[in-house]
Image (tube, helix red, strand yellow):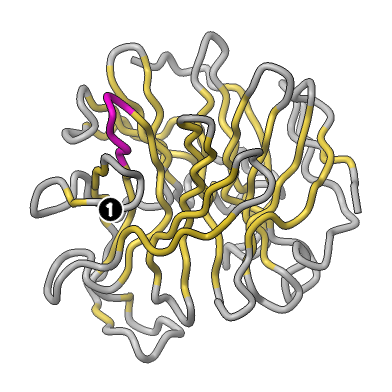
Amino acid sequence: MLATLALWALGQSLVLEPPWLPTERAPHRKGNLYAPELVEEKDRRLLYYGAQGADGHDRIHLALSTDGVTWKRHGVVLEDPGANHVNDPSVVVHGGVYHLYYTLAQEGVSDVIALATSKDGIHFEKQGIVLRPGQVGAWDSLLVGRPSVLMEDGKFRLWYDGRKDLPLGAPDKKAPQSARSTRSVGLAESTDAKQFQRVGPGPVMGNDVGGVHVARVQNGYVMVYESRQGTRWSASPDGSRWTDRGLLVPSGGTPLDRHGHVTPFLVPGAKPRLLFGAAMSPSWDVNRLAQIPITVELP
């Protein structure tokens, strides 16, 4: 089933339009779409995104466009009937192959990072897990997920967020919990796209940062990440040393995103813009894909 997708246009406030697919409705039936990933090609644009179905499970979807304005849903391109969570796509096209990295949780929050590949960007084959949680006691010993991958100088560079425990009162009772639980961001690298080695013993960014996207800019790298105040950002000369720059795009205060921005994606260039999940609920389970231009000068 194909349906037109409407994203925010510059200067407008449009959201993804219903009717939602069953795989987008979420159990509350209000829709839950987020984690955008845009691939721009000469004759088409591919918008991958995660959505939560009426059954409570997440799947990765695709929308296609020839002009970047009018979008058509293609539907689900990656799912796992036995898993709780398949989401957070990050796509790198290398050697004619689409490498789609994603968060996989078989149950609860047992997040790992996995890979699927495709020759056409539409039909994917799973290649297995590429990064698991760290050793016992490590900062990322409980879970790793929400990958952001770049291909540079013969290496796949993968930024991800991780934790060693959950906040007190978290619904997953099997996981360790702590009053001081926070997220951090790590970096891992690979030369074959499948076997990743962590860079350094600790994270490259702390301060409860998560849901990141890393983009190459003229003078280094920019990392955008989610928050309840809007999209925050950091800058780095090498992808390892990061400086927090504060809010990049604050929440607009409208019903669309009054509760923050989820899993943002930066589109750099002469006219940079931001794609993100606009949080309509304080529980972050009613989200819309939105787009907005960036007026802050990037490095």
Residue 91, percent across and down?
A: 51, 40
- Which one is nearer the viewer's eye here, 121 or 160? 121
Report whether residue 280 is seen. Answer: no
Report whether residue 259 is seen. Answer: yes
State the predominant SS element of the stretch in magenta.
strand
> Residue placed at 52% from the left, 37% from the top?
97
Residue 233, percent across and down?
A: 37, 34
Residue 238, percent across and down?
A: 20, 26
Which quadrant of the structure image shows residue 287? bottom right
Which residue is label 1 attached to?
195
Question: Which quarter of the image is occupied by the C terminus?
Answer: top left
> Residue placed at 22% from the left, 71% from the top?
141
Q: Which residue is most to the top?
A: 270
Q: Residues within 10 Å of mark 1 (few under 14, many from 20)?
A: few
- Which one is nearer the viewer's eye here, 154 or 237? 154
Which quadrant of the structure image shows residue 70? top right
Residue 198, percent across and down?
A: 18, 51
Q: Which residue is most to the bottom?
A: 173
Answer whether residue 105 is magenta in the image.
no
Does 51 appear above or below 187? below
Does 58 appear above or below 55? above
Would residue 125 be found to the left or right of residue 24 on screen?
Answer: left
* Magenta segment boundaries in residue numbering: 152-157
- Which one is nearer the viewer's eye here, 89 or 7? 89
> Residue placed at 28% from the left, 29% from the top?
154
Q: Secondary structure at mark 1?
A: loop
Would residue 120 be found to the left or right of residue 183 on screen?
Answer: right
Amino acid type at mark 1: Gln
